[in-house]
Amino acid sequence: MSGVPVVAIGTSAGGIEALHALLPRLRPEWNLAFAIVIHRQAVEDDARLETLLNSWSGITLLKARDGDPIIAGRGVVCPADVHLVVDDSHFQLNAGPRENHSRPSIDVLFRSIAQTLGEAGAGIILSGLLDDGAAGMRMLRERGGLTIAQDPEEALHSGMPRSAIAAGAEYVKTIDQMDELLEAFGTKRRAVHGTPVAAAGNGARLTRFTCPDCSGVLAEQQDGDFFYYRCRVGHTFSPQTLHEQKGAAIEDALWAAIQILEEQAELTERVARRARSRGDETLARRMDTRTKRYRERANMVRASLPSVDDAIETSEIRDVMD
């Protein structure tokens, strides 16, 4: 192992603003390596993000590459659409299954640091929605690592910090309070050791739920007080994220049904017009009946779509969770 402590930083919505405040405070003399995961789409420009973050940072930040050595006083930013992990003295990238519908996933990075570095690992959760990173932070703290959650009152989106706190984050700090902890962590130089992570699938119970990503059967698994769902492929979801994904799938399915019903109505209406033009009134009336039936069904499905009140209720629930 490299012997260099690694600080993992995970963030999502509102994360660029949080990093803008945190990165200038980082110092190379702390002898820490940093690994940053930001939830984002594969189409986003990694080079532009790297340039932007470096313009703010007190340490050198590079786009992570598979096999990069862990170097004190430097940091890496995970590219889009891959996971970042630590392996002995190097950073590794992989295209493993999405977790909480995200790749890169904060949980994946935190778990690898907990397993590989133990007390020489640290994790910081900044602004973001839902709860990615909470399970990994719990594991990191159990193995003696330093765990910090951004003060939810300061975060633009408090969901991830609140979930990290519920998972047992050791410290809850505003960004301007974090550098003191990080400096102490670097100079303390905790001994590097790891504790093996329990194999995924222990104590798993099959459910009737299907994976939003591949439609495979999900198994419910438990880690302490935390429950999560994993399919055979490896896609993993917290209950909150699974609920969000299922809700989106319902709306997509309803819109698809409306489109099919409206297409059927238009088609039978055209058949009716052509039948009348040929003098076949019997077929025309039959098609008129079907057209009416399809439109009634489309209206019934449309009435099932989320309303403004539904959207407000969902927003209020998310605010409570956030």
Image (cartoon, rainbow, N blue to C red):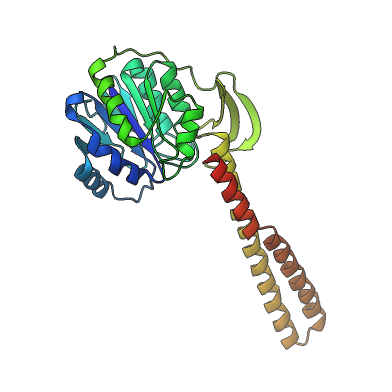
Name the quadrant containing residue 3: top left
Q: For this rendering, which residue is in front, 23 or 133? A: 23
- Counting from the top left corner in percent of width and height, residue 2 is at 23, 18
Q: Is residue 6 left or right of residue 227?
A: left
Image quadrant where one finds the N terminus: top left
Residue 93 at x, y = what percent?
32, 32
> Residue at 70% across / 65% down in the picture?
298
Q: Position of residue 104 (x, y in %)?
A: 38, 38
Residue 262: where, in percent of width, then height? 66, 68
Q: Residue at x 73, y 67 (%)?
A: 294
Q: Quadrant of residue 317?
A: top right
The residue nearer to you, when weighing 291 against 77, is 77
Question: Does residue 111 sit above or below 306 in this rendering?
Answer: above
Q: Is residue 223 left or right of residue 2?
A: right
Q: Is residue 221 left or right of residue 289?
A: left
Residue at point 45%, 35% (across, down): 161
Number of disc labels: 0
Is residue 265 in view? yes
